[in-house]
Amino acid sequence: MAKLVPLEGLGHEVVVGSLTPSREREYKITNMHTEGKHPVYAIVFNFLDVRYYDVFATACGPRISTYRCLMDGKLALLQGYIDDNSDESFFTVSWACDVDGKPLLVAAGSTGIIRVINCTSEKIHKSLIGHGGSVNEIKSQPLKPSLIISASKDESIRLWNVQTGICILIFAGVVGHRHEVLSVDFHSSDIYRFASCGMDNTVKIWSIKEFWPYVEKSYSWTDATSKFPTKFVQFPVLIAEVHSNYVDCTKWIGDFILSKSVENEILMWEPITKEENSNEGHIDVLQKYPVPGCNIWFIKFSCDFHLNQLAIGNREGKIYLWEIQASPPVLIARLSNPQVKSAIRQTAMSFDGSTILACTEDGNIWRWDEVDQPAIPNKLAIVPSKKQK
């Protein structure tokens, strides 16, 4: 399968956002919490259940914590879990659900073991073992949140059923990633499709449609998990080279993709394939969102629930807040404070974007709240449109 690069003359010219805020919103720091002596690599709100929209989780060293954002700017610690292995360093945490809708936390890191925590019983539900290297990111399937995908240093991606603990599919092999996989994301409305990216400078789009019977089988499997007929998927639907260096974060925005490398910018682009498994296709880069000081890897951005806004930190402790669906992109705010001096590894935006959380290399969690909170319309995308094919 050929690697696809942006072609000249397709669609619209690339639109670059200005670093001068033209629709500025004001935020202020309302809280700082020291999580520990280890870097805090991950922070994420729970968008799977409206009952917990103000609850978030963090990953710091061998510890996973959950907090609630209170109205007065405070943070309330809800639960904390410390791994039995003191040498564990968690790099990622994600929310999931069991088949009854009870909240689960799924976390992994340097050991490659994925811990599934039942937040109701406050006990380990499953430990998923299979990866041969550290796990860099985990994402839950929003349409079926008992399914997760994990991206690993071992150059593979795995699809798991957290209810049963079964590894359903392994995405690796002939045309798989050739270096660490750093980020993954499920399509928000296409249950069969997800994207991955990594240190081989590529973004790959995969489909599990052909293998969906194995997903269904994983829910009724009663034999040992090791006896499940796990399948290898070696061929992605599309391979895109839109960056010239490590790609450490990717996210679907409708049928478009946001991806970030160490090139001080985030790209929005459209993957176009003629058929589900065709080698033919192309990619069209639509917009660029500049992010100065973002030239180190493992810095990840986040969006609000409606995908209106994007927040990204940098190595200097600053945050850039972009309006995603405007064309050209609009910089809403640039957040900084003399006290925030360490690299921001990940951000987390609240449901409506009025609260922004950031976790830093020096073990802190920072909270920004919007001073004035005007209603943000849930408008449709106004990125450059394309004629129906």
Image (tube, rainbow, N blue to C red):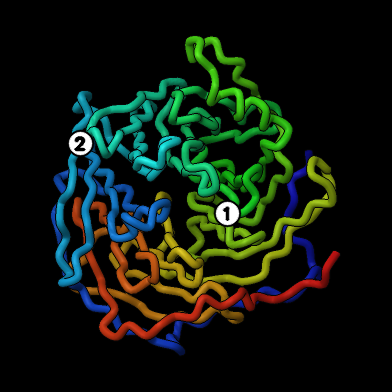
Q: Which residue is mark 1?
A: 188
Which residue sits furthest bottom?
22
Q: Residue at x 20, y 36 (%)?
A: 81
Estimate how packed mark 2 is, as few (under 14), some (14 to 19) or many (20 or more) residues with alpha carbons within 10 Å.
Answer: some
Report the front residue among 238 and 349.
349
Report the front residue among 159 and 173.
159
Q: What is the C-alpha distance between the residues marked 2 and 1?
A: 29 Å
For marks 2 and 1, the one nearer the N-term is: 2
Q: Is residue 54 left or right of residue 84?
A: right
Instruction: Name the secondary structure under disc 2.
Output: strand
Q: Is residue 343 above or below residue 140?
A: below
Q: What quarter of the picture does the C terminus occupy?
A: bottom right
Instruction: Name the secondary structure under disc 1.
Output: loop
Q: Residue at x 34, y 37 (%)?
A: 107
Q: Is residue 246 visible?
A: no
Estimate how packed mark 1 is, as few (under 14), some (14 to 19) or many (20 or more) residues with alpha carbons within 10 Å.
Answer: some
Q: Quadrant of residue 345?
A: bottom left
Q: What quarter of the picture does the N terminus occupy?
A: top right
Q: Is residue 40 left or right of residue 174?
A: left
- In x, y percent, where is residue 305? 45, 63
Q: Amino acid at mark 1?
A: Ser
Q: Residue at x 20, y 73 (%)?
A: 29
Report the front residue among 154 and 93.
93
Q: Amino acid at mark 2?
A: Tyr
Q: Is residue 44 visible?
A: yes
Q: Residue at x 25, y 52 (%)?
A: 361
- In x, y percent, where is residue 155? 54, 31
Q: Which residue is mark 2?
A: 81
